[in-house]
Amino acid sequence: MGEDKLKTSNISIRIPDDYRKRLQLQADKKGISFNAHVLRVLEIHLMSSGFGPTSLTSSSGRLFQIRYEPYLDNVDETTWAFFIDEPKFEKERAYYLIGIGRTVLRDWQVKDKSTVSKEVGLALLSFYNRQGMEIDRLNFTQYPGPDNDGRRVLQVAEVPETLEQFLDQLLEDKWKDKFVEQSDRSQDIRRGRPESTLYR
């Protein structure tokens, strides 16, 4: 996964009884330990404060956490799976396969295909977010069929000659993606999750 297992330390903290009771009630309601609940509250706060390396806040103020893992590495492409979670509701909202075609990797003279593909995928998600798109509502049209609406593989005709130029274009919001559009619903809802379960 995209996150390394963190080392832990034991610390003592004094908090008002009222906070402790409320946190304990919330933990009981979720069926988790008090410690696990406090860590989750802290994690969400750190992400929303900009301390999470794989988190994005959308233009509408929604916080997303991105998990990732290698998906495919063959002669045609190197692709990562990106899971878009909404911590507020503890839901995975979307699942994208974002990769780079072999000709692009060759032209960019990439030595570490896996790392570059992962970083480009994260850069693309940040780029879409800066364009005002809700990243759980992305709909890719590169490949036909509803099962491929989350698949995007960069090909040589749509990127500049070097990786540095491409990343610069993304950072300066100068690149155009003709294969992405924003749906009116998140991917999980489009694929069958009842909207009534969103707030549970």
Image: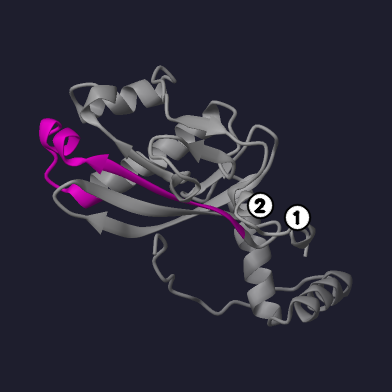
Label 2 CA crowd tier, 10 Å (few <14, some 14–19, many 20+): some
Residue 61 x, y percent position in the rendering? 69, 38
Q: Is residue 73 magenta?
A: no
Can you tell which quarter of the image residue 120 is in? top left
Residue 58 x, y percent position in the rendering? 62, 37
Element assignment for label 1: helix
Can you tell which quarter of the image residue 142 is in? top left
Question: Which circle's residue, 2 or 1, is located before the other in the chain?
Answer: 2
Relative depth, front residue between 196 and 2 = 196
Residue 189: numbered disc: 2
Element assignment for label 2: helix
Dots 2, 1 in contact, CB < 8 A? yes
Residue that label 1 marks: 195
Eyeballing the image, is 46 above or below 169?
A: below
Eyeballing the image, is 156 above or below 99?
A: above
Taking 67 as reference, is 36 left or right? right
Residue 76 x, y percent position in the rendering? 18, 46
Residue 15: numbered disc: none
- CA gap, disc 2 and disc 1: 6 Å
Taking 165 as reference, is 105 left or right? left
* Magenta span: 92-114
Residue at the spot 11% in from the left edge and 45% down from the top edge: 111
Quarter of the image for the C terminus: give it: bottom right
